[in-house]
Image: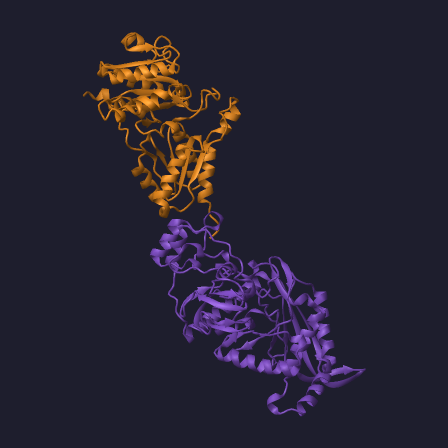
Amino acid sequence: MATTAMATRRLTYRDALREALRDALTRDPRVFLMGEDVGRYGGAYAVSKGLLAEFGPARIRDTPLSESAFVGAGIGAALGGARPIVEVMTVNFCLLALDQIVNNAATIRHMSGGQFSVPVVIRMATGAGRQLAAQHAHSLEGWLAHIPGLRIVAPATIEDARGMLWTALEDPDPVLIFEHQTLYNMEGDLAGDAGPVDLDRAAVRRAGAQVSVITYGATVHKALVAADQLATEGVDIEVIDLRTLRPLDMTTIEATVRKTRRVVIVDEGWRSGSLSAEIAARIGETLFFELDAPITRVCTAEVPIPYPKHLEDAAVPQAETIAAAVRAIVAREPA
Amino acid sequence: MPLLGADMEAGTLVEWLKHPGDQVRRGDVIAVVDTQKGAIEIEVYEDGVIERTLVEPGEKVPVGTVLAMIRGAGAGAEAASAASVPATDATGRPPVVPSPSAEARPPAEKPAGGPPPSRASGTEAVRRRTTPVARRAAAELHVDMARVTGTGPEGAVTLDDVERAAKDAQPAEVPQAADRSAAMRAAIAAAMARSKREIPHFYLSTTIDLSRALAWLSAQNAERPVTERVLPFVLLVKAVARALVEVPAFNGFWIDGAFRPGEGVHVGCAIALRGGGLVAPALHDVPGKSPTTLMAELRDLVSRARSGSLRSSELADPTITVTNLGDMGVESTFGVIYPPQVAIVGFGRIAERPWVVEGAVAVRPLVTATLSADHRAADGHRGGLLLAAIDRALLTPEAL
């Protein structure tokens, strides 16, 4: 391979997702994309812009406004041997397709005694931060991570935006990809040879000694901002990007907890019954005797996400609230 | 482990004189503890039955460590644990970590109204926080949790704290005589340095005519066998105690930025030890005791101080100290206050000197009385009143 092809490029998360779609559509003729406005409009977040012209209406398919119908169609297509990528505009809307996702996609392998698999990939936007208010801004991926039979992933980086889709398509079971709304415009560098990435391991985004901040998606970046601030105060934190929310990579989680012995879990979902609750419980179950501070969580306020900017900001985890949670468990009394 | 003076941080249990199942009453000597001041007999402050002992002979533990659990009279076993601060054991077993009272805290930290600091300990049952990994590490490293100072949030003991304590840990051994002398020197150094660092002393002195007092005393002593004769020092101590009843501002402690009056007047008598160093154990409730009784108690106190068998209350209770260097020919002595007390009264040599009485020079036995006092607690005016009250008390020795 020529060295020029290896050169690092600067692009957005959205571009990286589009590149992944293009790569998948190119590699495998069984792959197609469908969803509301993915074709002529180019996708609600412009991820599929230009793909209709490139791949044609048979593979870039606009659907009616019926999540249950088109997610169900995707499941059917997967059962029939296709490799569908279904885009749901936001996780709030996927509630209309929960029956298809939970009762069909997640169960058919088991209910057919392994005769059928459902290799569907469902992409959806999630999260707050763009003033889209309560019906478009919730983080419900933790709910879906409750369901056996699904794999749930959340790309937080340009590299994962580029690399997770193909690996998800290769999985014989349904994979749900959660793209945080605030990440689409994020710019970053991508290696020229970037390609598929694993969907099994959490990543250490910043190594540190004193506290492990465990999170995923957009709050990874808020945690990294908090880490920079805390470093100026002499507090050295490790930032873990879960990447895959189901199944959880307990190996990486255990390793970081054994290392730092203090944990802050940051989850843009609500605290009650959340993914953060699950992680905290598992750490408590298996690592109790390693802990040097109470397990701490930073979650979204238990309200529907507000529309006004200042209230929306106040409702969800921010770098400052993450830093404050860290300070509280490393606070030193005078010896 | 009671606090037997501001300079004490830890003590070594020498032996148990009472054992689980034994009935004890307030004031009974239940154990012997070795400190820089020698072996001290530990008195119990509760009535009840010893439920279990928590510290083994030979163990050195910090002040505030619970030595034993006592089941109060009529109480069940449950009440016993609730009424006492449990001590940690070396394995760091969970629910028995005491509150910050386990640390060698200065008496200033004790609850209000508890001037004899040792009496205040052992009643709060607040659980100290220890993180799981710290607890596990303490067990692995054989760190006594009672020794560990928590520096985490809200005073929690963290892994760092345990590892630091393990590094600092010293073997608990009963100190040898030579060690003890050095240890006592170090303890005196610490207490006196603290006193001079923290206490703004002021000094007053006055000369007192002892002719009436000594004449009365000679008459009394003439009727007694030699062994029961009362020394002038006893009259001086009694006069000080009497004066303190009149001027209580110097009888008590400076704790947490405020003066706390002593309960009763317990006069610490500075006693030089033969091997060097000194102790100032208390004569208890001096105002209510006759000179004869006080003399007997003083003799006993001096002999026990020198043989190293004082009782815990004698070391913990003094509300003021009296020092007398007259035997050495010293004319006056300005003492350094033993914190948290607020005053020390000094006497020099009783000597016959010219003294003007009713316009003529007469020869009178005189003594210089001095007061070193804590200016935070009281002012010179009151100091003057105290010295005047001592003088006045010595004018009517028959009332002493």
Chain assigned purple: B
Residue B30 to residue B211: above or below: above
Examine the image and state in which quarter residue A29 appears. Answer: top left
Question: Can the viewer see residue B349 in this picture?
Answer: no
Left or right for B250, reference A129 = right
Seen from the viewer's position, the closer of residues A41 and A90 is A90
Residue A157 to residue B189: above or below: above
* Residue farthest along the right direction in this orientation: B359
Q: Position of residue B125 (x, y in %)?
A: 51, 56
Quarter of the N terminus of chain A within the rendering: top left
Q: How many marks?
A: 0
Question: Can the viewer see residue B232 in this picture?
Answer: yes
Residue B222 to residue B78: above or below: below
Q: Residue at x 44, y 66 (%)?
A: B52
Q: Position of residue A106 (x, y in %)?
A: 31, 25
Left or right for B371, reference B68 = right
Chain assigned orange: A
Q: Position of residue A248 (x, y in %)?
A: 32, 34
Q: Position of residue A28 (x, y in %)?
A: 22, 16
Residue B314 to residue A213: above or below: below
Q: Residue at x 62, y 69 (%)?
A: B319
Examine the image and state in which quarter residue A211 appears. Answer: top left
Seen from the viewer's position, the closer of residues A140 and B336 is A140
